[in-house]
Image: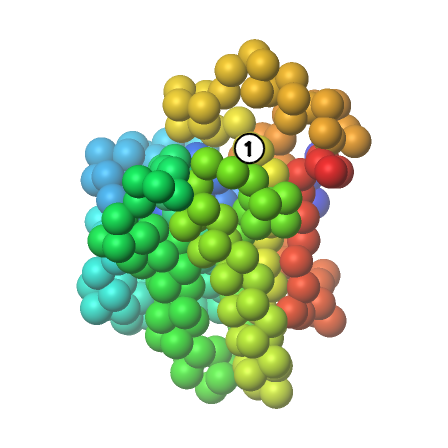
């Protein structure tokens, strides 16, 4: 039986990249807790279908807005609209990312910028947007989703790994700056999560065998494993945890 965090009921949660994969698991998990959930995603069809599914299951319909998170002004508008509709944001989850593979000798400056504008820049400007309301209420939890690719130094996508490493530094800096206002900032660091995207593009029997050999736990990681850890970091159960990285990778070394 999964934990129930009573303080998450009626909390307002804003999630980027909530239409599929880990993000969709975040949306579903917080709705199950009774939170008021707003999320953004590129694909309107996925977002609307997820809202229908969750409403059918929980009678708690999340609010979806289509948004390209590289458009900073539109992303800020989505946050403002959420606060107008649902109230001040209590929990921000910066989840949206794109792990497109690329090589050192082929990546262009524009592609480098695109990767960082997707995988790192939004984390700063969403925090900037939600901080005033959190300060006014004297509380808040910001969760930045990184990747253990930055800890392992995995090859095949150096711009992505760089962005994910930057999330760790940003998390610590924001935790220090926002701590006096009782706003906690932590990083959630998943390992190789078996999302539909990963299965379709990257998972092979050989790659999966190699990954599991490096993990202490010999089972694959699900989206729900990551979402359950996000619930903990968002709730008062982690009231004195900030500036930290919670790694969910089965003990991969």
- In the rendered view, does 252 fall on the left or right side of 42? right
- In the rendered view, does 239 fall on the left or right side of 55? right
Residue 16 visible somewhere in the drawing: no
Is residue 164 or residue 2 the one in the foreground?
Answer: 164
Residue 104 is situated, as x and y percent measured from the top left of the image, at 39, 43
Residue drawn at the location 26% of the way across and 54% of the way down: 109
Vertical side of 222 occupied by 165: above or below: below
Residue 160 is situated, as x and y percent measured from the top left of the image, at 43, 48
Farthest residue to the front: give it.
Answer: 105
Quadrant position of residue 228: top right
Secondary structure at numbered mark 1 = loop
Is residue 196 or residue 213 the one in the foreground?
Answer: 213
Q: Quadrant of the C terminus?
A: top right
Residue 204 is situated, as x and y percent measured from the top left of the image, at 51, 15
Residue 77 is situated, as x and y percent measured from the top left of the image, at 23, 68
Is residue 55 or residue 100 the one in the foreground?
Answer: 100
Q: Which residue is mark 1?
A: 193
Quadrant position of residue 123: bottom left
Q: Residues within 10 Å of mark 1 (few under 14, many from 20)?
A: many
- In the rendered view, does 243 fall on the left or right side of 136? right
């Amino acid at each position: 039986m999964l934990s129930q965090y009573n303080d998450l009921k009626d909390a307002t949660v804003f999630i980027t990249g909530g239409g599929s994969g880990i993000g969709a698991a975040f949306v579903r998990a917080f709705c199950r807790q009774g939170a008021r959930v707003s999320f953004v995603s590129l694909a309107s069809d996925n977002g609307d279908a997820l809202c229908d599914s969750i409403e059918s299951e929980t009678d708690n319909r999340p609010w979806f807005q289509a948004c390209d998170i590289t458009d900073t002004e539109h992303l800020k508008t989505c946050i403002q609209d959420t606060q107008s509709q649902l109230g001040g944001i209590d929990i921000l989850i910066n989840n949206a990312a794109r792990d497109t593979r690329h090589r050192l000798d082929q990546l262009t400056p524009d592609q480098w910028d695109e990767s960082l504008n997707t995988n790192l820049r939004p984390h700063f400007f969403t925090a900037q947007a939600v901080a005033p309301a959190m300060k006014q209420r004297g509380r808040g939890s910001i969760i930045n989703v990184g990747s253990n690719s930055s800890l392992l130094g995995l090859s095949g996508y150096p711009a992505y790994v760089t962005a994910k490493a930057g999330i760790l530094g940003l998390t610590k800096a924001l935790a220090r700056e926002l701590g006096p206002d009782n706003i906690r900032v932590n990083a959630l660091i998943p390992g190789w999560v078996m999302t539909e995207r990963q299965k379709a593009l990257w998972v092979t029997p050989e790659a999966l065998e190699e990954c599991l050999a490096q993990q202490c736990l010999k089972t694959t990681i699900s989206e729900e494993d990551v979402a359950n850890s996000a619930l903990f970091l968002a709730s008062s159960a982690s009231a004195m945890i900030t500036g930290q990285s919670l790694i969910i990778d089965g003990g991969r070394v």
